[in-house]
Image (tube, grey):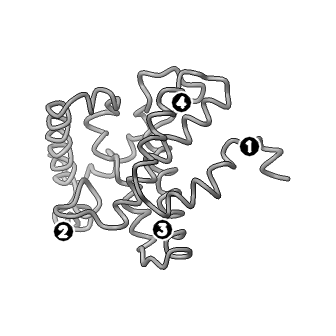
Amino acid sequence: MNENSFFALVFRQKFIKRWGLMRNVQSESLSEHACETAVLAHALAVIGNTYFGACHNEAQAVLLALYHDVPEVYTGDLPTPVKYFNDASKQSYDKVERHAISTLLQRIPREMRPAYEKLLGEPEGPRSGEALLVKAADKLSAYIKCVEEEKCGNTEFASAKHATWQALDQMNCPELNWFIQHILPTFSMTLDELQS
């Protein structure tokens, strides 16, 4: 086993396409999703710190977001309807994901592993505030993808958009609610509208 192959594997995210069951006007790689989720997680952390008196670690939110889907270099992007079909399928996927995380960590030099153990997978015990923001940013990124596809006339994403909106609505996250109210509408604008 190559103890130095972790970063080469992380860079393979660019080859993994998301939304595999859907016809896409614009395909999206796991790398693109990770970058956009990191931007959104950072924004949510800043919103929390600015408007709600939170003490989010903005840099930690970005790092967690950048690495949040790295195990998918082994598992692929399993469609949500399959992943969450029932409790048994979710438990099976969780087991596969834990194995992927373990395998990835073995590909990092032993001295460096503690830094990456904190970034990969679910932490034990309650989630940190930053991890919750990443979860919200991940869903928000999916919703924005649906909006973008819809803007291009692709009706294929209508059901995903509705389901993702319901998930966002149930998150009870003030930072997310602020973003939805003040920033999300701009994602439906044209370039000319954004620049005026």
Displayed quadrant of residue 15: top left
The answer to the question of whether label 1 and label 2 lie on touching residues, with beta carbons closer than 8 A, is no
Please, what is the three-letter code of the amino acid marked with disc 4?
Answer: Ser
Q: Secondary structure at mark 3?
A: helix
**Disc sitting over residue 75 in the figure:** none
Tell me if mark 4 has few (under 14), some (14-19) or many (20+) residues whose alpha carbon lies within 10 angstroms of its own.
some
Residue 124 vs residue 115, the one in the foreground: 124
Of the numbered discs 3 and 1, the one sitting upstream in the chain is 3
| Among the two numbered marks 4 and 1 on one chain, the one whose residue lies closer to the N terminus | 4
* Marks 3/2: CA–CA distance: 30 Å
Tell me the tag on residue 111: 2
- Mark 4 or mark 2: name the one nearer the start of the chain: 4
- Dot 3 corresponds to which residue? 45
Q: To which residue does mark 1 refer?
A: 189
As drawn, which residue projects farthest toward the right? 196
In this view, the residue in front, 5 or 132, is 132
The answer to whether 132 appears left or right of 45 in the picture is left
Dot 4: element: loop
**Residue 183 position (above or below residue 18):** below
